[in-house]
Structures are given as structure tokens and as C-alpha cells.
Image: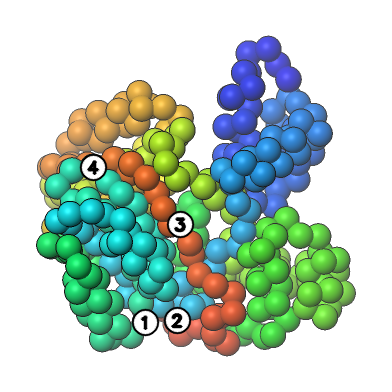
Amino acid sequence: MPQSITAEELRSRVLRELRDDGRTSYARIAERHGTTRRHVTQIVQQEIAGGRLRITASISPDLLGHERFAYLQIAVDGPITPIREALVAMPETTFVAEISGNYAIDAEIRVGADPHLREAVDRIRALPRVREIRLHLYESIEINLFSPIRTGGAGLEIDSADRAIVQHLQRDGRASFRELGDAAGVSPSGARLRLKRLMARGAVKVVGIPVRGELPEAPTLGVGIQVTGPVTDALARVRELDPEFLAIAVGGYDLIATLSGESNDEVLVLVDRLRSFPEIARIESWANLRIVKEQYGEGDRIIASPPDQGEHQHHRG
């Protein structure tokens, strides 16, 4: 390893590689960052054993029958624990975090056809101690590092072997093609071709998701953005900040983003850059103090053939 790269910097780079592709070769990671395959393997094993990383398959929301996506900020009177546990238990929630500011907790929900969204929000509103819900609909998700956005249109047929492969990957994102083939009742080469097809169509993404829990080492900041002029102009500027998540929203914000970095200083620099863009009229930000759920679908719920969702698939992450 080059002397200019510290152990912590190498760890961050390895985790970033797995965030982009959870099945990327450890040897390739090692070559790119001037270390050994054994060292990369040790880093990953330590992160998994320490409960700080899980490598899993996330599934495109249209393959799960999701049609509406919303971000909720929830004000609470009294202890937050019962509300947090109820939100985590809901199958509709994909992201739940305790946050700073006027709202104690936030959540992303993904639901099927109407009136599923209203019913899900009503269930949350009925929880004891929930005082207020501020709801923002997603018109489209532009970036989500931990989940596919759309399958690329209709016509993607999913059979039982595909489901078995995805289910196995959700338990072990780095399972060998032989293991995937055994699980699906096909050959290793057949499993490889099936996974390649699913990934090429954006149906499945294998990602290294950080288990951030309490006091995350890499801080994340949620940002609600109001823009000046066309949303597309502001969208292009926010993309320059390499956000974890970016959505066009309907409601109190024009855009919703998640910014992250290796330190608070890095995140503060990003926020300063965001404020400086002339396309940005106003921002509201909140720290994700404790992320308690990041989960993007279960394999046994995959539908056979997704509907044609058009050019953009709605949702959060």
C-alpha cells in the first residue's frame, strides 16, 4: 500500500468500491488501490463481522409492485422509541432515521396503487405520540446509490430461477455462481447469464450497504431544496455534489437530497457549495443522527413482469 494512503483511507476506498458494485473483484480493488487481495478481504470481513456492512441485492421498485413513493417528516410528542419501532416494522418503509430539527424522525415509504399511500400514512398518523406528518411525494428518483431506480421498461420476464438467485443474493451478495446455480436449479454459467441480464436491465443491484446505526462515522445530511428557475437546471447543479440520493419532489421541496462525506467538514463544504449555486433559492437541512432502517425489498415478493413505468420510476433510499 502506498505510504500516502492511511489504513482508514484504504478502508473508505474499499467500502466505496463495494457500494458501487458489491460483487466487484477483491483482486481488482487491491490493484486499483495499491494493496493486496488478502488485505482487502480482511477489511471486508472485519466490517461484516463488526455489523458495519452488509452486501446484499436490492431490487427495482417496479419489480416489487411499488407505484407511489413518499418522504415523511414526523413530529413527535414524548418518547420516540415506540414510533421508531413501529416504522421499522412496517413493510412499506425502506428508510427510517432519527433526525435533528423540528421533526424527530423521518421515513421513506414505497406503496402500491392508491389508496395504499393514504392507508399507510393514516396508520403512521394513528401511532401514539405522533403530532404531525409532513409529506413530500417523489415525482422521480434521479440518484439512489443503494437501490435500482427502474428496470428500463416493460417486457422483463422473471421466473422462479431468477427469484431464487435474487433471494440467495439477498442473504449473500457475493455468493459464487455455483452457489447461485445450485439455489436456482441451473448451471453456474446459467446463473451468471441470468444475473447479468437482471443487472443490465436495472432490475437488481448488488451493493455494499453501510450499517450506520448510532453515531455514524461517515455523517449524512438530508436537504430539502427550493429552486429558482427550471428544476432541471438546479438538478444538474446538485448532481455536481455526488449526493447519495436525489429526487424531484412535489410539495414543500422541489428537490430532496442526501449528502454524505468522510467527516463533518466534508459535508459542511458540500452544503456551502449548495448554498452558493444561483439555481438554489432556499435549503432546509437535517442531520441523520441514527439511521435505523435501509432496506430495499424482499426477493420473494418479485412480480412476474413489471408494468411499463415510462421514462422515470418514482421512489426514494
Q: Name which quarter of the figure residue 274 lies in.
A: top left
Residue on which disc 4 sits: 100
Q: Nearer the viewer, residue 287 or 311?
A: 287
Q: Quadrant of the N terminus?
A: top right
Q: CA distance from mark 4 to mark 2?
A: 32 Å
Q: Residue at x 64, y 22 (%)?
A: 7
The location of residue 297, given as percent across then percent down, is 50, 70
Q: Determine whether 223 is above or below 146 in the image.
A: above
Amino acid type at image mark 1? Gly
Q: Earlier in the sequence, mark 3 or mark 4?
A: 4
> Helix, strand, or loop for circle 1?
loop
2 relative to 220 in the view: left or right: right
> Helix, strand, or loop for circle 3?
strand
Amino acid type at image mark 3? Glu
Q: Is residue 216 visible?
A: yes
52 relative to 254 in the view: left or right: right
Rendered image: mark on residue 65: 2
Q: CA distance from mark 1 to mark 2?
A: 6 Å
Residue on which disc 3 sits: 294
- Evaluate if marks 1 and 2 touch, with contact meaning CB atoms under 8 Å apart: yes
Q: Name which quarter of the figure residue 31 lies in.
A: top right
